Amino acid sequence: MRLSSVLPILLFFFSCSRSALSNPPEELGKVDWQRDFDRGLERASLEDKPVFLLFQEVPGCATCRNYGNEVLSHPLIVEAIETLFVPVAIFNNKGGKDAEVLRYYNEPSWNNPVVRIVDYDRLDIVPRVSGNYSQLGVVQAMVFALERRGRAIPAYLQLLCEELQARQQGVETTTLSMYCFWTGEKALGQLEGVVATEAGFMDGREVVQVTYNPKSISFEKLVKAGQQARCADRVYAHDEIQKAAASAVLGEGRAGSKSTFRPDRAPKYYLSKTHYRFVPMFPLQAARANALIGQGKSPEEVLSPGQVELARQAKDQPGKKWENAIGRDMMEAWRWEGG
């Protein structure tokens, strides 16, 4: 096997001993599933972990296949399921032990994917996830389950939840002008509620396009924070409401309408100067990592153990042909190809 993008070697959590499924169906994604519920419960008891219980139709319809390819193949969702839980897959269209578990939980046969997170006493920790076939549905369930169990939620999982929730609720974008967009990305990328940043040019000025969750940070608060950091000399508003609000904060003549945006050739400047640039990240994670490095801190507090391991490999093996992952779609950057 070879990787077609930034991963020339296997990450540690994919190189662990695999399940009995020698050729896992696409409905199960990239997760290393246990197929025996009783053994999964035993392992959960020994490791003191909840069980991530998937009821899935295999082979299944388009919804089931999409769930495997889009939800259960996201690298950080896979890592969270495999390291924080004991993953067990139950086929809802088979007999034997699968059918026994199906009857125990009164789950329907030949159904779309259902996720239950249960304790090793078989009791639900959080409500079952049914009818929600999004990445957010699974991530929220994992976060809630860890909270219920009194476990620390890894920063990477919390940030992923924040970004997915923001994009579901609806994000907004504005553009701030400043003396140095590298400094702007560093300052704005650390703000709570900011989902993504991109440095570039507009009307010949250095700017940062900021995508943010208006339910977490208001436009006015964002502009004020930028002003305090000397990163909001001018606002290129994306609508008339933003323009009026920016004028109220910065004063007349310092708010205009957006024009053509040209991205910088060195996005995430601070991140791009380190070996962490080879690690695929989602936009919020990349914004936080870049901000941390710009402050002279390690970005590893917002990375998963698998990402940290990949960064270590990139640092220790500089002779390999690593590819810059900044700005790339995370799932595409991690996608496998046979060969």
Image (cartoon, rainbow, N blue to C red):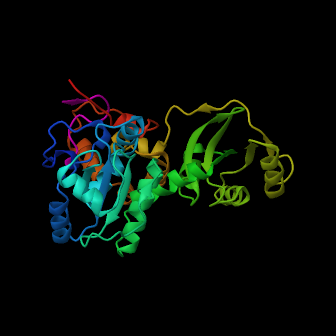
Residue 203 point in image, percent of width and height: 72, 32
Numbered marks: total: 0
The residue at 71%/59% (across/down) is 224
Asked whether 279 falls inside the magenta stretch, the response is: no
- Camera-side residue: 284 or 204? 284
The residue at 49%/53% (across/down) is 291
The residue at 26%/51% (across/down) is 90
Magenta stretch: helix, strand or loop mostly: loop
Residue 305 point in image, percent of width and height: 28, 55
The residue at 25%/44% (across/down) is 315
Q: Quadrant of residue 5?
A: top left
Image position of 148 (left or right of 318): right
Q: Quadrant of the N terminus?
A: top left
Asked whether 6 falls inside the magenta stretch, the response is: yes
- For residue 44, say whether it is visible: yes
- For residue 295, say whether it is visible: no
Image position of 232 (left or right of 132): right
Residue 158 point in image, percent of width and height: 44, 60
Magenta span covers which residues?
Answer: 1-12
Image position of 315 (left or right of 324): left
- Residue 126 against residue 213 in the figure, above or below: below
- Camera-side residue: 299 or 147? 147
Residue that sits furthest to the right in the current view: 252
- Camera-side residue: 36 or 334? 36
Residue that sits furthest to the top in the current view: 339
Residue 97 point in image, percent of width and height: 18, 55
Image position of 256 (left or right of 124): right
